[in-house]
Image (cartoon, helix red, strand yellow):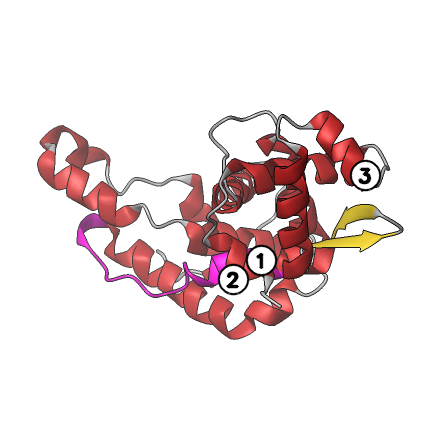
């Protein structure tokens, strides 16, 4: 049986994403468990395409079937996203104005890699992030594949983390709970834009005086690493 991670290299395109989005909305927002005929009624795909692709999703374990109704499996959803995150955990080479920041990020990548299974196990907050990303895909034409949905989940993680660390209610000395700390850590390790920013600065002198700057991500890294980014 293939694992949920096989969906990170999809061949079918939009159909599986549409199925997952409709199942997630029904299950987590409406309290429904859909039958195949209800998926056919709600989706712009043929009965054959839906039958074929929902079967493939069941084979991966991401979707389960009970009494002819389909459910998104939360544990399998976390496995899928964990494998996606794992691909971001390779250390980056420090480059240009972001040397100190990248050193701090790489420290978090090493620690996250070591604790990855533990961080994801039963993490309800991350399940909510992924369910939200799936439901968003039903209204966003650019979220065509399961990898697209995972990247959208990355955006949700990063934007949530930035808002947390810039909130008046946030205290760097006491992160509210372990799930929130995991979210902050993922926001740090998922950001791989610094290499591109460094190249951009080297091409455009007008940007040099603003880089590396002091973005909310710096506060996040300082919170996670102590004073290692200073």
Residue at 75% x, 26% y is 41
**Residue plotted at (48% across, 70% down):** 113
For label 2, the residue is: 83
- Going from N to C along the chain, the mark reached first, 2 or 3, is 3
Mark identifier at residue 80? 1
Question: 9 or 29, which is in the foreground?
Answer: 9
Proximity of marks 2 and 3: CB atoms separated by less than 8 Å: no
Residue that label 3 marks: 34
| Label 2 environment density (alpha carbons within 10 Å; few <14, some 14–19, many ≥20) | some
Q: Position of residue 1 (x, y in %)?
A: 62, 68
Mark 3 falls on what kind of element?
Answer: strand
Relative to 85, is 28 on the left or the right?
right
Residue 76 spot, x, y in % from top left: 67, 59
Identify the element where label 2 is drawn: helix
In this rendered view, identify the residue nearer to me: 35 or 33: 35
Calculate the distance from the C-alpha at mark 2 to the C-alpha at mark 1.
Answer: 5 Å
Q: Tell me whether the residue at label 3 lies in contact with that at label 1, contact meaning CB atoms closer than 8 angstroms.
A: no
Task: Please identify, in this view, whether the residue under mark 2 or under mark 3 is nearer the observer.
Answer: 3
Looking at the image, the residue that sits furthest to the front is: 48
> What residue span does the magenta drawing correspond to?
79-97
Mark 3 closeness class: few <14, some 14–19, many ≥20 residues within 10 Å? some
Label 3 or label 1, whichever comes before in sequence order:
3
Looking at the image, can residue 185 be seen?
Answer: no
Residue 6 visible, this angle: yes
Report x, y in % for residue 203: 10, 36
Identify the element where label 1 is drawn. helix
């Amino acid at each position: 049986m293939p694992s949920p991670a096989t969906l990170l290299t999809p061949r079918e395109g939009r159909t599986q994403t549409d199925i997952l989005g409709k199942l997630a909305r029904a299950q987590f927002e409406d309290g429904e468990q859909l039958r195949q005929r209800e998926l056919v009624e709600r989706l712009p795909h043929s009965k054959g395409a839906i039958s074929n692709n929902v079967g493939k999703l069941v084979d991966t374990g991401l979707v389960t079937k009970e009494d002819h109704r389909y459910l998104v499996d939360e544990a399998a959803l976390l496995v899928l996203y964990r494998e996606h995150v794992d691909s971001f955990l390779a250390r980056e080479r420090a480059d240009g104005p972001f040397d100190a920041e990248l050193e701090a990020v790489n420290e978090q990548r090493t620690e996250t890699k070591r604790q990855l299974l533990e961080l994801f196990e039963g993490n309800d907050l991350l399940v909510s992030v992924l369910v939200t990303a799936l439901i968003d895909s039903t209204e966003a034409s650019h979220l065509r594949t399961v990898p697209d949905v995972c990247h959208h989940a990355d955006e949700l993680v990063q934007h949530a983390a930035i808002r947390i660390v810039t909130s008046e209610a946030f205290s760097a000395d006491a992160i509210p709970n372990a799930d929130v700390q995991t979210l902050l850590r993922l926001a740090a390790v998922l950001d791989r834009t610094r290499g591109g920013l460094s190249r951009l600065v080297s091409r455009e002198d007008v940007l040099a005086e603003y880089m590396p700057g002091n973005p909310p991500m710096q506060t996040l890294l300082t919170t996670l690493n102590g004073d290692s980014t200073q």
